[in-house]
Image (cartoon, rainbow, N blue to C red):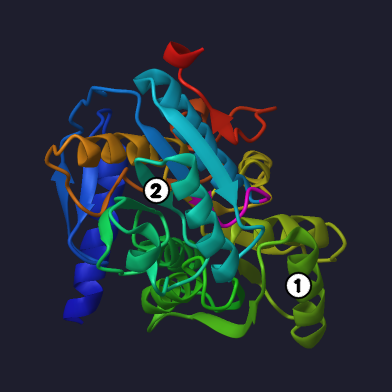
């Protein structure tokens, strides 16, 4: 009972922070405890060279991170080089990309890991500082991390769904994304914790890469096995697949997304998705650049920081809430940005 009360307090505390009209950040002590952190300004003292590694840019989550990074790179006058691994569980590819970053002359590496651990990271980077982007590897080499605990990104949708169900039984198909990557396990843990003791029941779990075709095939297979599913809960890609599937069912699927994408936003506006969480990806991309600059300039750097998490529904999914979450329509990935001072 004490754990449940603590989780409920965390949920409502985060909601109050997310609705505050300021630029306060959250510093996470662990998956449940956090402190409010002021957003201190920074000025780059030179044209730093930052090299960013992403799992993939086929997911609009990372596209929005990319937009935030290039926006901050332009603002602070630094050079940015971006490399993507092509998917999750691509350790060998990202290890080679770290070598490419070193050859490019990176002052710091911004690591969005495609795996839950990153063996030999310290040997690969040598003395180059590493700032962790979103996905935690818990490696001692990391100087600081920007990102929410993925536990919370599963927990908050779970709490919302329990309240939304009003005590009625719900059968859930859970689609948390890739196995052992991208925070999938932590999101599933958070969701399970949130629905414990309620009438919300997980009837099956389907894991697979964050690729629309993969998620669509998983969804078809799971619905054949569990035709009485009430709600699909999962990644933004899973939610997109479910939106397409729901139109073909006599009783359309209810859908909840662990995080936001452009398609999920459209689903919210049209009432096709009942809820989505947003960890404000554009803002996080900007924060990563700021943290890297502070590390390189030997300034104080708080660890494990993030923007507040937003809980979005059809009623509050507006431009104000989306400003720091999604890249603009028509934005294409930026792989290389060179400071205007060098042009």
- Of residue 177 and residue 43, the one placed in the foreground of this image is 43
| x and y, in percent, of residue 192 in the image | 43, 79
Q: Is residue 168 left or right of residue 231?
A: left
**Count of picture labels:** 2
Asked whether the viewer can see residue 5, the reply is yes
Of marks 2 and 1, the one in the foreground: 2
Tell me if mark 2 has few (under 14), some (14-19) or many (20+) residues whose alpha carbon lies within 10 angstroms of its own: many
Q: Are marks 2 and 1 in contact (CB under 8 Å)?
A: no
**x 75%, y 59%: residue:** 212
Q: Earlier in the sequence, mark 2 or mark 1?
A: 2
Q: State the mark number for residue 325.
A: none
- Of residue 147 and residue 121, the one placed in the foreground of this image is 121
Does the magenta segment cover residue 322? Answer: no
Circle 1: element type:
helix
Asked whether the viewer can see residue 68, the reply is no
Magenta residues (range) = 53-58
View extreme (front): residue: 103
**x 64%, y 62%: residue:** 87
Tell me if mark 1 has few (under 14), some (14-19) or many (20+) residues whose alpha carbon lies within 10 angstroms of its own: many
| x and y, in percent, of residue 254 in the image | 66, 62
* Relative vertical location of residue 162 with respect to residue 59 in this rendering, above or below: below
* Relative vertical location of residue 290 with respect to residue 281 in this rendering, above or below: above
In which quadrant of the rendered view does residue 92 lie? Answer: bottom right
**x 27%, y 67%: residue:** 31
Q: State the mark number for residue 109.
A: 2
| x and y, in percent, of residue 57 in the image | 63, 48
Please give the residue where the numbered disc 1 appears in the rendered image. 219
């Amino acid at each position: 009972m004490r754990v449940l009360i603590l989780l409920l307090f965390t949920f409502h505390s985060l909601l109050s922070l997310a609705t505050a009209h300021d630029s306060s950040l959250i510093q996470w002590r662990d998956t449940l405890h956090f402190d409010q952190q002021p957003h201190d300004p920074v000025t780059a003292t030179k044209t730093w060279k930052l090299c960013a590694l992403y799992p993939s840019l086929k997911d609009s989550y990372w596209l929005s991170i990319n937009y935030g990074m290039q926006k901050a790179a332009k603002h602070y006058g630094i050079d940015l080089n971006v490399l993507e691994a092509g998917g999750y569980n691509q350790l060998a590819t990202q290890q080679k990309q770290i070598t490419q970053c070193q050859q490019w002359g990176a002052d710091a590496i911004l690591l969005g890991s495609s795996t839950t651990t990153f063996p030999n990271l310290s040997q690969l980077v040598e003395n180059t500082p590493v700032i962790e982007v979103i996905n935690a590897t818990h490696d001692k080499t990391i100087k600081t991390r920007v990102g929410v605990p993925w536990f919370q990104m599963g927990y908050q949708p779970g709490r919302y769904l329990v309240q939304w169900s009003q005590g009625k039984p719900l059968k859930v198909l859970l689609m948390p994304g890739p196995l052992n990557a991208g925070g999938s396990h932590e999101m599933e843990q958070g969701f399970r914790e949130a629905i414990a003791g309620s009438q919300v029941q997980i009837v099956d779990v389907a894991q697979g890469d964050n690729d629309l075709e993969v998620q669509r095939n998983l969804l078809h297979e799971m619905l054949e096995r569990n035709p009485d599913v009430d709600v699909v809960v999962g990644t933004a890609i899973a939610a997109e697949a479910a939106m397409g599937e729901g139109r073909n069912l006599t009783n359309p699927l209810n859908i909840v997304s662990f995080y936001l994408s452009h398609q999920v936003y459209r689903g919210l506006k049209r009432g096709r998705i009942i809820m989505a969480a947003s960890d404000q990806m554009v803002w996080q991309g900007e924060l990563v650049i700021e943290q890297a600059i502070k590390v390189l300039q030997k300034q104080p750097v708080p660890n494990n920081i993030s923007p507040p998490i937003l809980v979005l529904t059809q009623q509050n999914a507006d431009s104000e809430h989306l400003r720091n979450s999604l890249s603009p329509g028509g934005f294409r990935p930026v792989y290389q940005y060179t400071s205007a001072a060098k042009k």
